[in-house]
Amino acid sequence: MDMLSALPKRTKLTRRQRRMMRKRVEDRDEVDEAMNEENAEKVKRIDCDDVKDVEEKKRPVGETDTSEKNFEYLPHPADVQLHAWGKSIEESFCNAVLSMNGYLTDLDSVEIDERCEFKIEAKGHDMISLLYKFMDEFLYIFNTEDIIAREVCITLFDKNAFRICAIGRGERFDLRKHPQGTEVKAITYSAMQIHEKDDGVHVFVVVDI
C-alpha cells in the first residue's frame, strides 16, 4: 500500500493525477453511453441554480454529523471496503465520503477553514453510478486542490434525475498537522452496494489503495 504524501502547490498535474483524470474520462464515457441507451429520457438535465426549492429554502437535505463516525472499514483481499450508514440515503452518501477521507487522514485533526469551502455537482444514470461520481468528485478535489473535507452537506438530491449538489468544508492537507493515512487511488464499482434497512441506509464501496 502506498502511503499518502502531501501534495505541493503546483501549476501542472503529477503523472498519477493525469492517470486518474484519464480513468475518470473513460468512466464518464461509459456512463454517458449507458445513459444514452437506457436512461436518456429519464434523466432531466437541470442546473443547481435553477432549483426553486433550493433557492427558496437554502437548507441542506443531507448533512454529516461530525460528533460520531457512522462508518467502518471492512477487510478486502487487495483493497479496502468502506461501509457507511445514515438515517437517509443522503446521510449515508455523506458518510461514505467521510469514510474515504478518514482513510486519508485522521478527521479529528481536520478543522473547518472558511476559505476552503467548495461546491461539487455529480450526475449518474442510477443510484450506484451517482454514489460513484459523488465520491469521485471529493477525491478529485483532494488530489487537485489539496483540500480534505471534514463536513459534507448535500444541498440538492434529485432521485429522479440522479443528480447531487453538495458543499464540502475542511482545510488544506498539511503533513505538519494531519497524520499520514493510506492513499486512495480511485473509487471502484466493485461490489458497490446500497441497502435500505430498518435502521437506515447502508452503502458499501471498495476503493483502490
Image: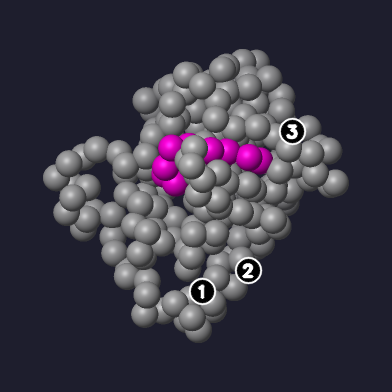
- Figure check: 153 above or below 110: below
- Identified at 35% across, 52% down, the residue is 157
On residue 44, the disc is: none
Query: Quick check: marks 1 and 2 in contact, CB under 8 Å?
Result: no
Image quarter of residue 61: top left
Instruction: Using the numbered discs, state the Cα–Cα distance from disc 1 to disc 2 in whole angstroms.
Output: 10 Å
Percent x, y of residue 78: 84, 47
Circle 1 residue: 32
Instruction: Using the numbered discs, state the Cα–Cα distance from disc 3 to disc 2 in whole angstroms.
Output: 25 Å
In this rendering, the label closer to the viewer, 1 or 2: 1
- Identified at 55% across, 59% down, the residue is 128
Identify the magenta region: 82-93
The answer to which of marks 3 and 2 sits earlier in the sequence is 2
Q: Is residue 85 magenta?
A: yes
Viewer-nearest residue: 73 or 182: 73
Q: Which image quadrant: the C terminus?
A: top right
Percent x, y of residue 22: 65, 62
Q: Is residue 65 magenta?
A: no
The answer to which of marks 1 and 2 sits earlier in the sequence is 2
Circle 2 residue: 26
SS for callout 2 = helix
Q: Amino acid at mark 3?
A: Thr
Q: Amino acid at mark 2?
A: Glu
SS for callout 3 = loop
- Figure check: 187 above or below 63: below
Percent x, y of residue 178: 63, 20
On residue 182, the disc is: 3
- Figure check: 142 above or below 170: below
